[in-house]
Amino acid sequence: MTAATATTTTPAARAVKTRRFRQHRTFYLMVSPFFVLFGIFGLLPIIAAIWIGLTDWDGLNPAKFVGLANYATILTDPLFAKAVGNTIFIWIGSTVITCGLAFVLAYLINEYVLVGGGTLRMVFLLPMLAAPAVIAIIMSVLFSTNAGLMNAALSVLTGDRVTFDWLASTGWIKPIVIVMITWRFLGFHLLLFVAGLQSVPRELYDAARVDGANGRQVFWRVTVPLMLPIIFFSATSSTVGAFQLFDEPFVLTNGSGGTDQAAEVMGTMLFRTAFTEFEFGTASALSWIMFALIAVFTIVNSRLLRVRT
């Protein structure tokens, strides 16, 4: 009985689908270029990266299949462990400082700045207009050994000529990178938080104050819970950006990774492996490991912030 029904209804359903496709074929024709371009420039490189990651290939000679040997080589490389440690250090530092400072500034602007708030937001957004290499050069000048403003200020304060090499210091190079990231992306996260705060209904604040809540209770029990989706997006974008970090440490250390590889991150390691050592198989495997780490830490962010969709 069921088979007979399916036999009689399937051609009718197929006819309906065909008729709907013909009715909307103009729509499918209009969106098809996107899928074609995505297949060529998005999907095919992903598939190629999977295959290259399983081979030993220098870009010129035929690729040799080596299985998971590239992944084993990376995971047992001490330099990879150092690059991951540096990346996580910069990720935590830049995310906490950038998102925290942006949230506080956005809250103050939203609550207390009545005139000129748009201009103030544009001021914080200006560093994003500069290229990362330009910002890195500015930071190089600020922390230069002989003519840097930081050493000049310390010389004035101490009365002695300070010639400390900040960029060669293994202890200071990562905080300098964090300062660069904070300076560059503070405006972006500020705009996110301002938009989120302005979307919170004022009636909720008024209702909480009528119920006797003070300013701190309103902030922690009304503002923060409603801002969790924005905080999650901000933290996730910072996570992705930190694990793809390349320009700032590369320019500051002239591509060397700094003293004792103190500023080596996974992005610079990937670049050197691919385009200096020409080990494209290892570089492709490294890119997939980076993808896995980004996915793991994004899930961790989601769990910590308890975001519910």
Image (cartoon, rainbow, N blue to C red):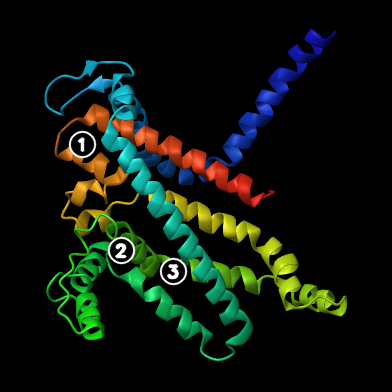
Residue drawn 35% across the image and 66% down it:
179
Kind of residue at badge 1: Ala
Left or right of 238 in this view: 285 = left
Distance of mark 1 from mark 2, alpha carbons?
26 Å
Residue drawn 30% across the image and 45% down it:
267
The one of 248 and 18 positioned closer to us in this rendering: 248
**Sequence-wise first label, 2 or 3:** 2
Element marked by disc 2: helix
**Sequence-wise first label, 3 or 1:** 3
Q: Which mark is residue 176?
A: 2
Is the residue 76 above or below the residue 113 in the image?
above
The image quarter containing residue 182 is: bottom left
Kind of residue at badge 3: Leu
Q: Which mark is residue 186?
A: 3
**Sequence-wise first label, 1 or 2:** 2
Kind of residue at badge 2: Ile
Q: Which residue position holds label 1?
A: 274
Residue 106 at x, y = what percent?
55, 75
Residue 53 at x, y = what percent?
30, 26
Residue drawn 29% across the image and 70% down it:
130
Choose mark 2 or mark 3, whichever is in front: 2
